[in-house]
Structures are given as C-alpha cells and as structure tokens.
Image: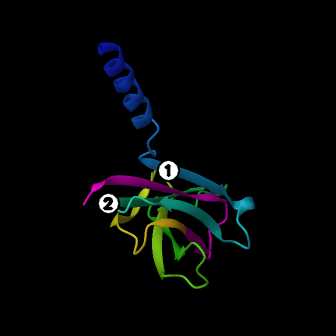
Amino acid sequence: MNRRATVLCALIAALSACSEPASFEEFVRADMAENGVYEFVLDLNDSLSTYDISLFTKVDAPVMGTVRASSSMGLEVAWKEAGAITPALSETVYLPYGGKIGASLYRSGVKPSSPGSWTVSVRPVDPPAGLRGIGLICKRNGTR
C-alpha cells in the first residue's frame, strides 16, 4: 500500500508541475510589426485569476542625444477576443521611454469579460526615431 501512495504522490506532483506559467513576456521588433501595429496574443483562460499587464519599449538614442528620460509615446491599444471582428476595448495610453526606464504598468487586476484567447494590438502614435520595438508582460495573479 505504501508503494501505491508514493506513486500517487509522485504523479500528483508531476501533474501540478505542468500548470500554466504565471507570466508571459514578448517583445516584437519594429521590423516585425505589421503596418506599424504590434500584436500580442494572451491566454487569459483562468477565470478565477486577475492579470497585470505592463508595456515596455526600446528606443535608440539619437546621435545628438535629444531623447530625455521624461519622453513618452502615445499608444493606441485595442483588445479583441478570439473570433471577434471589433475590439471590446480601445484606448490611448502613454508609455515613457528614454533613460533607464523598465516596464510600465498598463493595467492592474484585469479580468476579461470572458476567459480565453485575447489579442492586444498596440499602434504607436508618432513613434520616435530609433524605436526598436514594443514589449508586453502579462502576469497572472491569484484569485480575486
């Protein structure tokens, strides 16, 4: 009987190790953006969790050094559920760039209207010279 219990415990431990990762990070290079739009597909299947979404960018400083740490870039962000034709949400936000700025929190405690796959499209408004790309970090939080 002890052997069966040991095997069962090992099997449960192995299956729990296969759980979905707690975070997702992707960086899309500027030359890979389609018509200036950066797309990120998020797996938001856990209906009991909330998600924190952060954005980040890399901008090469011009030779003259005109990029300041206080610079920001407007981003048109659209959320679309898998199979949907029109976005469920569209908004313009501002992302700081320049200097040594890391990821900037975009939304905290996101709970999608329906669990599943969502596409987040990001289009920079008047992108700065030297824009290398845009990245997104999605972190799954515990249940709310």
User: Is any part of residue 96 visible from this angle?
Assistant: yes
Q: In the rendering, at what x and y percent does residue 72 appear?
A: 49, 68
Q: Residues within 10 Å of mark 1 (few under 14, many from 20)?
A: some
Mark 1 is on which residue type?
A: Phe
Residue at image position (44%, 67%) is 115
**In this rendering, would 96 be left or right of 143?**
right
Instruction: Specify the quadrant of the image occupied by residue 111.
Output: bottom left
Residue at image position (47%, 81%) is 91
**In this rendering, would 142 be left or right of 122?**
left
Q: Which residues are magenta?
A: 119-144
The residue where tag 2 is placed is: 48
Task: Report the quarter where the N terminus lies.
Answer: top left
Q: Which mark is residue 110?
A: none
Residue at image position (58%, 80%) is 84
Residue at image position (45%, 44%) is 21
Mark 2 is on which residue type?
A: Leu
